[in-house]
Image (spheres, grey):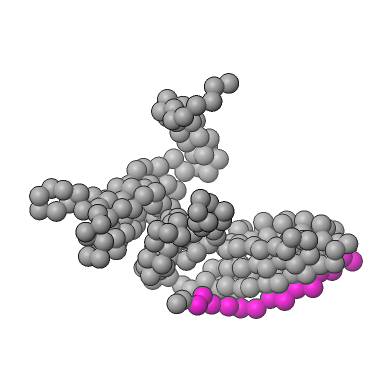
Amino acid sequence: MVVGGTDQELTARLDRELSVFNNAATGANDEQGLSVRATDDAGELIGGLTGWTWGGCGGVNMLWIREDSRRDGWGSRLMAAAEEEARRRGCTRMVVSSMSFQAPDFYRRLGYVETGRTEGLPAGAVDHHFWKSLDQTPTPRLTLAAIVEASSEHAAAVNGYEDAVLALMERHGGRVERRLRTADGTTEVQVLSFHDRDGLDTFLADPDRAALRADLGDVSPDARVIEATDVFH
């Protein structure tokens, strides 16, 4: 075993091997790089964007604007160009992450919705993860907020049940936007969404969900579910 710094050969090999694995697992083998470059009249770089498209999704890896041009709208133009190219390639959504000291509010203004965050980074920074639909005539998703509470005695069983049940959502056009759980495992807050109410109804009627509930037996968590919408500031 060799431990060291940057290893370009290793990076290239891992990229090839993981691409093979990922393509086989998903059936998507159309990964391409994505870049947008902006230059001034002298040919000097004003700013640029690099990213990727794969399996109907586009992603931004890096976005940078020269300091003297950062209030001239170049960031929005670069993102618009990247989104348009992603649409041309058949993508229906876009993802990007931004450190708290970078530009999370910039992405919010462009219509990106925060789906999660990674905390505890250097200098107390937070990495914000964003998602955006590229459908130009999107139908608003049905968003639900749920609070699930269990006794300390049954917390492990209830949490296992929630893990299994939420995994069924994808087959009904649903997804888990975020989950938060208290340290003792007795209370969980979930943000969930579905394409429409029909998706929610079929999820609630899923026989696998009913079977999981039957397996849980008499251990009954208290749950409150409300419909909600995003609040933008």
Residue at point 47%, 43% (across, down): 28
Q: In the displayed structure, would residue 199 be above or below residue 17?
A: below
Q: Is residue 26 left or right of residue 63?
A: right
From the image, which quarter does the C terminus lie in?
A: bottom left
Spot occupied by residue 30 in the image (x, y as percentages of width and height):
40, 42
Spot occupied by residue 12 in the image (x, y as percentages of width and height):
42, 29
Spot occupied by residue 183 in the image (x, y as percentages of width and height):
74, 60
93, 149: nearer the viewer: 149
Residue 16, visible in the rendered structure: no
Q: In the displayed structure, would residue 86 be above or below residue 30?
A: below
Q: In the displayed structure, would residue 222 be above or below residue 217?
A: below
Spot occupied by residue 203 in the image (x, y as percentages of width and height):
67, 66
Find out whether residue 123 is within the magenta segment.
no
From the image, which quarter does the N terminus lie in?
A: top right
Residue 153, visible in the rendered structure: yes
Residue at point 85%, 63% (across, down): 152
Count of residue discs: 0
Q: In the displayed structure, would residue 20 be above or below residue 9?
A: below
* Chain part drawn in magenta: 218-231
Residue at point 57%, 68% (across, down): 194
